[in-house]
Image: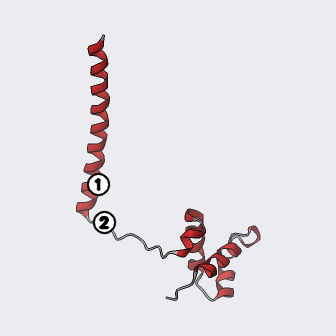
Amino acid sequence: MGTYNKGFRIKVVKEAIKPEMQGMEEHIAKKYGIRPDTVRRWVAIYNDYGESGLGVRITSPAKKSDKEIQLEKENAALREEIEILKKAAAFLVELSRK
């Protein structure tokens, strides 16, 4: 896989996002000697992060283990429980003042 500088990536993306070039990734890719899915990926990065995103290599995150997934679910449940308890505590304080 080749590496391309930020200026080249921006040039390709700017051409690909022109209204008259929508859906023409294969044509653009052929013109610049790159793969069509590379053009699509760069456009997606540009849409998400702007030009600055094209200057860094973005890799897909490693697949999470079952343990990580379980811990994230547990963490989310505990955070939700904390929020409920905070609201209940505030409610009880209000009741005690009346």
Which of the two discs, 2 and 1, labels the residue nearer the N terminus?
2
Q: Residues within 10 Å of mark 1 (few under 14, many from 20)?
A: few
Please give the label number shown on residue 72. Answer: 1
Residue 14 in which image quadrant: bottom right
Q: How is the image coloured?
A: secondary structure
Q: Which residue is mark 2?
A: 64
Image coordinates for residue 89, horizontal then vertical, percent: 27, 26
Q: In this image, 95 relative to 19: left or right?
A: left
Q: In this image, 62 relative to 55: left or right?
A: left
**Cβ–Cβ below 8 Å for labels 2 and 1?**
yes
Q: Residue at x 38, y 69 (%)?
A: 61
Q: Residues within 10 Å of mark 2 (few under 14, many from 20)?
A: few
Q: Residue at x 71, y 75 (%)?
A: 15
Which of 17/35 is in front?
A: 17
Of the 4 image quadrants, the one containing the C terminus is: top left
Residue 79 in which image quadrant: top left
Which of 24/84 is in front?
A: 84
Image coordinates for residue 60, horizontal then vertical, percent: 42, 71
Q: Residue at x 26, y 15 (%)?
A: 96
SS class of the residue under badge 2?
Answer: loop
* Residue lying at the far top of the rendered structure: 98
Amino acid tagged 1: Glu
Image coordinates for residue 59, horizontal then vertical, percent: 44, 74
* Residue lying at the far right of the rendered structure: 20
Q: In this image, 96 relative to 35: left or right?
A: left
Q: Residue at x 26, y 44 (%)?
A: 78
Spatial CA distance of label 2 from label 1 is 10 Å
SS class of the residue under badge 1?
Answer: helix
Which of 94/37 is in front?
A: 94
Amino acid tagged 2: Lys
